[in-house]
C-alpha cells in the first residue's frame, strides 16, 4: 500500500479540465515515488479520451511542474504529489528538491503562467520553422522528364 500526502494539490494552478482530469488519473496510476509508466494511448484509454487530448493536456501539467516527462511512456509526478511507501520517503524526496522546484516557494501561479507562455512560444517557433521548410520545398522547380 502506498502513502501520500497530497498537500501539493493546494499549489495546483488553474488548469484546463482535461489537464486536471489527467493529473488525477496519473495519481491513480503511479508506482511508489510517483513514477507513472504508461503511453499517451494507455492514458487516453484509461480516461476514455482521444490520444490528442492527452497530448494537449500534458504541457499544462509540465508547465505547472506537477509532472516531468522522463521519456516516452514514463512520467514522474512531483514529490509533493507522489505517493511513497512511507511518509519519511516523501519527506526526504521533498527536502532533496532544489528550492526553485518546490511548489510552495514563490508564486506558483506566476511561475506556471511564465512556463506555459515559454512552451507556447516554442511551439509557435517550431510551427513557423516547419512552415518555412515546407514553403522552401514548394518553390523548387520541377525537373522535366527525359524522353
Image (cartoon, rainbow, N blue to C red):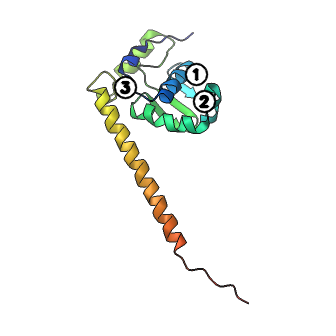
**Residue that badge 3 annotates:** 13
Q: Residue furthest right?
A: 147
- Disc 1 secondary structure class: helix
Whole-angstrom CA distance, mark 2 to mark 1, is 9 Å
For marks 3 and 1 on the same chain, the one whose residue lies earlier in the sequence: 3
Between 121 and 6, the residue placed more toward the observer is: 121
Whole-angstrom CA distance, mark 2 to mark 3, is 22 Å
Whether pointer 2 and pointer 1 mark residues with C-beta atoms closer than 8 Å, the reply is yes
Local crowd size for mark 2, using a 10 Å CA cut-off: few (<14), some (14–19), many (≥20)? many
Local crowd size for mark 3, using a 10 Å CA cut-off: few (<14), some (14–19), many (≥20)? some
- Residue 108, horizontal then vertical, whole percent: 31, 27
Give the side of residue 101 with respect to residue 68, left or right. left
Quarter the C terminus occupies: bottom right
Label annotation for residue 43: 2
Q: Which circle, 2 or 3, is nearer the viewer?
A: 3
Between 105 and 127, the residue placed more toward the observer is: 127
**Residue that badge 1 annotates:** 29
Q: Residue at x 35, y 38 (%)?
A: 115
Q: Residue at x 49, y 59 (%)?
A: 130
Between 37 and 88, the residue placed more toward the observer is: 37
Above or below, 10 relative to 15: above
Give the side of residue 75 with respect to residue 113, left or right. right
- Residue 65, horizontal then vertical, whole percent: 40, 30
Amino acid at each position: 500500500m502506498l502513502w501520500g500526502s497530497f498537500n501539493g494539490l493546494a499549489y495546483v494552478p488553474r488548469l484546463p479540465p482535461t489537464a486536471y482530469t489527467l493529473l488525477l488519473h496519473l495519481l491513480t496510476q503511479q508506482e511508489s515515488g510517483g513514477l507513472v509508466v504508461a503511453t499517451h494511448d494507455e492514458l487516453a484509454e484509461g480516461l476514455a479520451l482521444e490520444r490528442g487530448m492527452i497530448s494537449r493536456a500534458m504541457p499544462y501539467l509540465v508547465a505547472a511542474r506537477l509532472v516531468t516527462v522522463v521519456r516516452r511512456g514514463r512520467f514522474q509526478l512531483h514529490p509533493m504529489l507522489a505517493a511513497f511507501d512511507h511518509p519519511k520517503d516523501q519527506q526526504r524526496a521533498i527536502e532533496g528538491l532544489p528550492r526553485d522546484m518546490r511548489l510552495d516557494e514563490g508564486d506558483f501561479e506566476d511561475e506556471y503562467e511564465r512556463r506555459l507562455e515559454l512552451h507556447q512560444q516554442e511551439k509557435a517557433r517550431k510551427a513557423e520553422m516547419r512552415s518555412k521548410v515546407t514553403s522552401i520545398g514548394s518553390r523548387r522547380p520541377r525537373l522535366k522528364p527525359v524522353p
